[in-house]
Image (cartoon, rainbow, N blue to C red):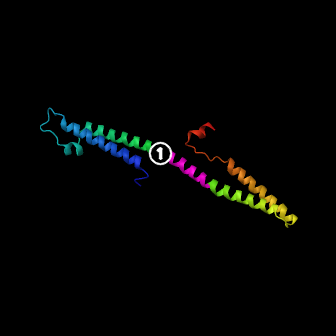
Amino acid sequence: MLKRYKEIFFGLLLGLAMWGADALMHTMMPMPGKGHQLTFMEELFFPDGPQLLTRLLFLGFAFFLGWLLWRSNQRERAVRDLERRMAVFHEQVINPASSILEECSALLRSEGLREESVELVKEIRQHAREIDDFAKDFPRRSALSPASEKE
């Protein structure tokens, strides 16, 4: 789960780091009017109203940035998965279709086939050629590469 939502966790950690940095700054500032200076732990875990609101705003903003980054990367991962599946499609379709074309051509060159067999082999070869042409026309290039935008 951590690997899948790492950008969101990064946003939360960033927000917590901003929370801690703000708490540290408040412990270093002199507090006029108060009886004693708050310790870092008191300021970190029990902030006053305005500091709490500011820190929650920091946390919310960092979480939102992490979520935006996660969404952006999620789309990129989906495109890469689609590219991988398209490459597998090409390997699974083109190789057998090419093999069928070669075998049909070899059968047609051989002697001793009956006329029905020759017609059947020609029909199989035609269908294999259509599949081969379709698979070759199917876009194989990367959707992320700049070359694919030019063509």
Closest to the observer, 109 or 17: 109
Q: Name the residue at 81% across, 61% down.
A: 109
Q: Residues within 10 Å of mark 1 (few under 14, many from 20)?
A: few
Residue 119 drawn at (x, y percent): 84, 61
- In the displayed structure, 11 sits above or below 97; it is above
Camera-side residue of 50 and 61: 61
Magenta span: chief secondary structure: helix
Which residue is situated farthest in the right direction here? 115
Residue at x 20% of width, y 45% of height: 41
The residue lying furthest to the top in this view is: 32
Left or right: 105 with respect to 33?
right
* 54 versus 130 height, above or below: above
Task: Judge left or right: residue 18 versus residue 101.
Answer: left
**What segment carries the magenta color?**
73-88
Horizontal relation, residue 108 to residue 48: left or right: right
Q: Image quarter for residue 32?
A: top left
- At a point 54% along the width and 47% down the height, the residue shown is 79
Q: Residue at x 68, y 59 (%)?
A: 96
Q: Give the residue number, with chain letter if any, for mark 1.
A: 73
Asked if residue 14 is positioned above or below residue 99 in the image, the reply reads above
Give how far across and how far down residue 7 sits, in percent: 41, 46
Residue 1 in which image quadrant: bottom left
Q: Is residue 41 above or below residue 121?
A: above
Position of the C terminus, as image quadrant, is top right
Q: Nearer the viewer, residue 90 or 70?
A: 90
What's the amino acid at mark 1? Asn
Secondary structure at badge 1 equals: helix
| Image location (x, y in percent) of residue 50 | 26, 36
